Amino acid sequence: MPRTLAKSVNHLAHLYTRKPMAERVDMSGRNVIVTGASPNSLGYETARILASWGATVVATSRHNVSLMENSLKDDLRTTGTGGNTLSAHRLDLSDVDSVNRFATWYRKHHGGNLHALVNNAGIHRNIFNPRRKPPLSRDGFEIHWRTNYLGAFHLTNVLLPLLKQGGLESGNARVINVASHLHDRVGNKDLFHESKRYHSWDAYGRSKLALIHHSFEIERRFSKPYNLQSVAVHPGSVNTNLTKMKPPQGKVKMTLYRINASLAPLVLLPSNYGAQTIVMCASKQPLQGGAYYYRCTIAETTDDSKDETASKLLWDQTQAWVETLAKPEWSEHEQV
């Protein structure tokens, strides 16, 4: 409880004080993928800002891709940028075929050029009823683990040849994993042994701790030979569609829903501010890799997240799972 209270006080202090902003960088010639970019999301703001700075951006979403693309291009036109450097494509991280189709499409339409992958897409289910029965993906995994971590790992893995190539040719490529301060709800033992008592917030934190390990391990494996950096980012507690729930049935529940909806903008960051650290990590030159960023600066993570043995074990186990999956049409022939 004291830790939770301290984090809440710290968040509110940051909410009502000056917010750090990423410095504009000329992103011309940089190819970026931003996952989870539906309207009113961190990914949407990240894609919009990077495209307005000149990057060639591909934004993804599971649903309403045309709506997302049109909305982003309209926003870019209002700023005088134009939407010619932005395109969109469907991507469901919990679906192996969807990931492979996206990777094949990207290589075909963008010539294999990739300099930054922003793994922003994620879910947080049952926020207000966290002890419900664990929701499962179609292939039988706990849904937060499957989408937030396994899906992001799989996507990064199939795009790794392009990222390595981008790092070698440009001198710097990056993977940015959007994590969360909630990674401190769990420890490394939870990564390898699921708790018998399910709590959706712990499941969410488990997936985010795994993403931090993923970032640090990419840095260890690929930064020197391929100029491929990786960082993890805590964007802050942000008012996005991730925090919104569907209108419930019943008068009492509907009243609570309306109260929550009205209070959210008062206690959560607007998505534009939440995206600033992600944007900075995707654009700043140079950037220290293998770190965890919050409010546009390096921040501390838990001791568990710094355990290199756990990072390696988690990588090896996840890589073994990825090797059992179907591969994109081009992956077997790609050499880097």
Image: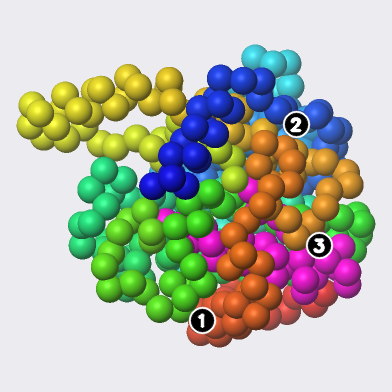
| Structural distance between the alpha carbons of marks 3 and 2 | 21 Å
Residue 316 is covered by the magenta coloring = no
Examine the structure image and report whether residue 229 is included in the region drawn in magenta.
Answer: yes
Magenta segment main secondary structure? helix
> Label 1 belongs to which residue?
321
Task: Answer whether residue 104 is visible to the viewer in this image.
Answer: no
**Tag 1 secondary structure:** helix
Residue nearest the viewer, comparing 51 with 309: 309
Closer to the camera: disc 1 or disc 2? 2
Which residue appears farthest toward the front when viewing the image?
2
For label 3, the residue is: 228
Q: Nearer the viewer, mark 3 or mark 2?
A: 2
Q: Answer few, some or many: residues within 10 Å of disc 1's Cα (few below 14, many 20 plus, some between 14 and 19).
A: few
Q: Amino acid at mark 3?
A: Leu
Location of residue 196 with respect to 317 vertically, above or below:
above
Counting the numbered discs, the total is 3
User: Which segment is the magenta one?
Assistant: 204-233
What residue sits 48% from the left and 51% below the top?
Answer: 182
- Which of marks 2 and 1 precedes in the sequence? 2
Image x and y of residue 247, in percent? 21, 32
Q: Percent position (x, y) of residue 235?
A: 59, 40
- In the rendered image, which residue does mark 2 sit on? 22
* Residue type indicated by callout 1: Trp
Disc 3 secondary structure class: strand
The mark nearer the N terminus, 1 or 3, is 3
- Front residue (pair 217, 61): 217
Task: Tell whether label 2 touches label 3 (CB within 8 Å).
Answer: no
